Image: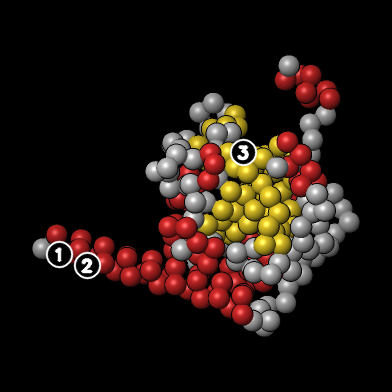
């Protein structure tokens, strides 16, 4: 009896997850084939809190709205413009089920161990390479172990328009689940301090099933704080 209940529960969970993935892919299809997505604009504020307010606004949007905003995003003139530290946060991925899946994949598996939380990205070498930032609670410090290459290419999610692409292929083992990972990034309209990203893996549906996240540029450390670290 218990085995039967578990099988039914597992089947129901599989169907629900498949349905959620299908909804994600349908929305991606709408992005590629429709000009009737929600017309959104993030409020422009001239204050120093603009970036944080933009991130708050992004958290209020659902995945379809985030896709629409992504489609109108911009890219930097040069990749060196994004060099530095960026704090990251996961965004809505079509409701509680897929958002929870994104959180488990990112902080449960991608983070490579308990007590580690994904915390953003750092762009290096004039923006052409980078690493993911992880916060390690036990040691109270950031950890950077998963690398990627950066380029400006045509978007897979939004064909015909360029985006910043982060590719992990050259830095993962042949059996790594992250080998086919690709992040697509664009600047949120109205600011150069917040990037809207869509992350995906080929084995889970590719760009059509991408999960939204955002990156907020962190201030460069002052000379005094750098000297203190030394």
Taking the spot 49% from the left edge, 51% from the top edge, the residue there is 180
Q: How crowded is mark 1: few (under 14 residues within 10 Å), some or many (20 or more)?
A: few
| Disc 2 to disc 3, C-alpha distance | 41 Å
What is the number of the mark on residue 78?
none
Is label 3 in a helix, a strand or a loop?
A: strand
Question: Which residue is label 3 attached to?
Answer: 131
Circle 3/circle 1 CB separation < 8 Å: no
Percent position (x, y) of residue 165?
64, 53
- The part of the image, by quadrant, that contains residue 134 is top right
What is the number of the mark on residue 8?
2
Taking the spot 32% from the left edge, 65% from the top edge, the residue there is 13
Task: Give the quarter of the figure containing the C terminus.
Answer: top right
Percent position (x, y) of residue 113?
44, 36
Residue 13 lies, with reference to residue 120, above or below; the image says below
- The part of the image, by quadrant, that contains residue 12 is bottom left
Is label 2 in a helix, a strand or a loop?
A: helix
Taking the spot 55% from the left edge, 76% from the top edge, the residue there is 29
Question: Which residue is label 1 attached to?
Answer: 4
């Amino acid at each position: 009896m218990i085995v039967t209940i578990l099988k039914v529960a597992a089947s129901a969970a599989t169907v629900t997850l498949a349905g959620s993935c299908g909804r994600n892919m349908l929305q991606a299809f709408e992005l590629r084939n429709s000009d009737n997505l929600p017309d959104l604009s993030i409020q422009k504020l001239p204050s120093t809190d603009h970036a944080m307010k933009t991130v708050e606004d992004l958290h209020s949007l659902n995945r379809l709205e985030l896709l629409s905003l992504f489609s109108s995003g911009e890219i930097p003139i040069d990749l060196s413009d994004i060099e530095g530290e960026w704090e990251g946060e996961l965004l809505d991925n079509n409701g509680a089920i897929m958002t929870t899946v994104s959180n488990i994949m990112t902080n449960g598996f991608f983070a490579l161990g308990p007590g580690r939380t994904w915390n953003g990205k750092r762009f290096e070498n004039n923006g052409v390479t980078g690493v993911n930032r992880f916060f390690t609670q036990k040691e109270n410090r950031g950890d950077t172990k998963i690398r990627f290459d950066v380029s400006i290419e045509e978007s897979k999610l939004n064909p015909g328009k360029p985006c910043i692409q982060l590719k992990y292929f050259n830095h993962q083992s042949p059996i790594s689940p992250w080998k086919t990972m690709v992040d697509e990034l664009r600047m949120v309209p109205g600011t150069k301090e917040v990037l809207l990203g869509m992350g995906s893996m080929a084995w889970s549906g590719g760009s059509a099933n991408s999960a939204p996240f955002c990156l907020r540029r962190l201030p460069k450390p002052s000379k005094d704080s750098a000297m203190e670290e030394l």
